[in-house]
Amino acid sequence: MSEVHKDGPIIIIEDDKDDQEILAEIFKKLDLDNEIIYFADGNLALEYLNQTEVHPFLIMSDVNMPKINGFDLRNLVQTNERLHIKCIPYLFFTTSATKKSVSDAYTLSVQGFFEKPSSFSELEKTIKIIIDYWKACVAPGQYE
């Protein structure tokens, strides 16, 4: 069984530089083989996803971002036939959740909605759980 997509890059869409640095430290500590690619802007991430033949392993997106918010970005990814067919797991990772935001996210078929824990160790544990889950999960890309 091929694991093409599981070796693909992890796309992080996060406009907060401090959060990017903390996530970078966690991913380095987890010592993953996947390349981690950061975008501070959803439009830049969308441009990258549309212009590359790379099949990302996972997209982790903030919700509240300038220019294009996470919900609008998810909708654009989901309704883009070229991207939709890649079956990239799309998760929201944000500082706050409301009943409406979680409900809206799942209406857009996100595969997870996570609040960023306040402590580094809890954040690391959450990221590890997410990565371990998706590494173990059977995905359509494994059958290409």
Image: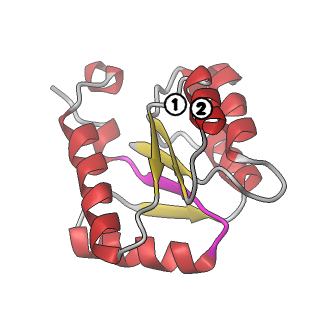
Report if residue 80 lies within the magenta region: no
Which amino acid lies under the numbered mark 2 shown in the image of this protein?
Ala
| Residue displayed at 49% across by 79% down | 21
Pointer 1 residue: 110
Mark sitting on residue 105:
2
Q: Residues within 10 Å of mark 1 (few under 14, many from 20)?
A: some
Viewer-closest of 97 and 128: 97
| Residue displayed at 57% across by 35% down | 102
Where does the magenta region start and end? 8-16
**On the image, which quarter does residue 67 sit in?**
bottom right
Q: Is residue 90 left or right of residue 75?
A: left
**On the image, which quarter does residue 108 sit in?**
top right
Q: Position of residue 23 (x, y in %)?
A: 43, 70
Q: Nearer the viewer, mark 1 or mark 2?
A: 2
Viewer-closest of 118 and 55: 118
Q: Position of residue 88 (x, y in %)?
A: 46, 33
Quadrant location, the N terminus: top left
